[in-house]
Image: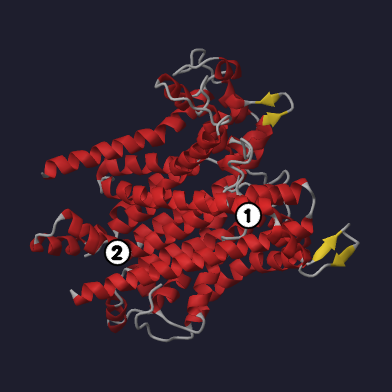
Amino acid sequence: MNERRFKKRTIFLLAYLLFAILPVYWMINMSFKTNEEILGAFSLWPRSFTFDNFRTILTDASWYSGYINSMIYVAINTLISLTVALPAAYAFSRYSFLGDKHVFFWLLTNRMTPPAVFLLPFFQLYTTLGLMDTHIAVALAHLVFNVPLAVWILEGFMSGIPREIDETAYIDGYSFPRFFLTIFIPLIKAGIGVAAFFCFMFSWVELLMARTLTSVNAKPIVATMTRTVSASGMDWGVLAAAGVLTIVPGAIVIWFVRHYIAKGFAMGRV
Amino acid sequence: MSSSMKPVNQKAWLLILPVIICVAFSAILPLMTVVNYSVQDIISPERTVYVGTEWFKQVMRDEELHSALLRQILFSLAVLLIEIPLGIALALSMPAQGWKASAVLVLVAISLLIPWNVVGTIWQIYGRTDIGLLGVALDKLGIEYSYTGSARDAWLTVLIMDVWHWTPLVALLCYAGLRAIPNAYYQAAQIDGASKLAIFRYIQLPKLRGVLMIAVLLRFMDSFMIYTEPFVLTGGGPGNATTFLSQYLTQKAVGQFDLGPAAAFSLIYFLIILLLCFILYNWMQQLGQQTRTEDIHE
């Protein structure tokens, strides 16, 4: 009985993974083809295998600097998001105070603004501050949607930790910072791992704000990619290669946080 | 956020102050500017005329907007009904530890990391019946399929693309939520001889309430604002079968340079999302509280 159940699960998982991987495979497939082959005929694997698409990206500074710019502002953003969200999430999960529910919900409402019209005011605000075309501008702008997300995720995980743990620690003579850093944070590792990954992800793929706030020095890879569409048509191969390369940093991030996510509370404690 | 007997402590405000500053910095001023636009006729940057609620009335009467809104609500509902159960099922079937867990995590997360314009482009090729894997496969199976020709196919392709793109978000949240359940709960259930279904219903589901709330709200608001992927894939067509709200808004704001009506539109759009999220949020919280009291009565 158990055996059969296990098998059903595995089959379901494999079926989903296949569904998830096939479009990605098609992108990888395209990235090793020439444009003629992509548009010319259907082929399950590249017939005239070429590295040219990747060479274009890795040898051209205006291409690869896009990756570096993106990584810089995404790292700044993720760091700030988690640093401010951790204490706030703790406050929301442990105390009640004036307006707590309203502030909590208000935070999330900042993710609900359709960007098209808000871009112009954003542009004006950051021009006035003299922050245009800097990494910090994009990092700050992305806080609008990442901080609320981090607070909500972390609050969810913190509320799952019984309050007795806090009380016991205080009775044992722990100060708040020491309790928070040495006892509490290890307990919500899974939540921190997920929150970090989502902050990274949402900042990494965001296009409209990042493109509006930068021109040359901090131009992100997602904006650089849009130039594969030109008057002479679409450069499918290079776009696919750029897409493949955008997966790499994120895959590395999730590889690093996987232990936090996979083990979490259940095995980390006691 | 549950309200069960938390100690009152106004000093907690100090802990959330940094968050408020960070968010308000980039949220309040742009919002005020948009409110300002929405009540003016902007003929040129120097010449503006106050028009009151005229734009709001005009937007509310817009027939095309009504049909775009209806399409949007149907789409978001479909997204939630598919992605939430699928995400939970996926999280339950992912291995809990070992190298398999790591490999599966990375594979599942990949679709999230692809920039949205690339997602649209890849599916554009992927679905073509002459050179794309999906299109060719469907063609070989004898299914007539064309996302550029048929409104139904276009709509389904956008939906499946969204399921492919975003189910991992639900799955990762639930997976981390499941890992955060202490082993003691499972041991207790084992002693009681609880079935798999009972474990899911009385241990896993209640513990997932927090992450599910986030997943549902996130998927709802993000799908409600979907723009890049359908725009790249179908351009809103055929006809306007896949013209969702934000694309209609962008046409107005960028295409016709009508900043006033576009701002009014944005605010109405924002209020619709806010209202629907508020209803969802309260409904889910009530649902959680109800099941909790049920559990106590049992």
Return the residue at label 2.
B207
Say which chain tag 2 marks: B
Say which chain tag 1 marks: B
Q: Nearer the viewer, residue B108 or B73?
A: B73
Q: Is residue A185 visible?
A: no
- Residue A221's tag is none
Q: Position of residue B171 (x, y in %)?
A: 37, 50
Picture quadrant where residue A193 is located: bottom left
Q: Position of residue A219 (x, y in %)?
A: 67, 44
Give, as a three-letter code, the residue at label 2: Lys
Residue at the spot 70% in from the left edge and 59% down from the top edge: B61
Q: Position of residue B204 (x, y in %)?
A: 26, 60
Return the residue at label 1.
B66
Residue at the spot 63% in from the left edge and 54% down from the top edge: B66
Q: CA distance from mark 2 to mark 1?
A: 39 Å
Vertical placement of residue A103 versus B185, above or below = below
Q: Position of residue B216 (x, y in %)?
A: 43, 58
Which is more foreground, mark 2 or mark 1?
1
Secondary structure beneath disc 2? helix
Secondary structure beneath disc 1? helix
Q: Nearer the viewer, residue A153 or A182?
A: A153
Same subunit: marks 2 and 1: yes
Vertical placement of residue A171 versus A149, above or below = below
Q: Residues within 10 Å of mark 2 (few under 14, many from 20)?
A: many
Vertical placement of residue B87 versus B139, above or below = below
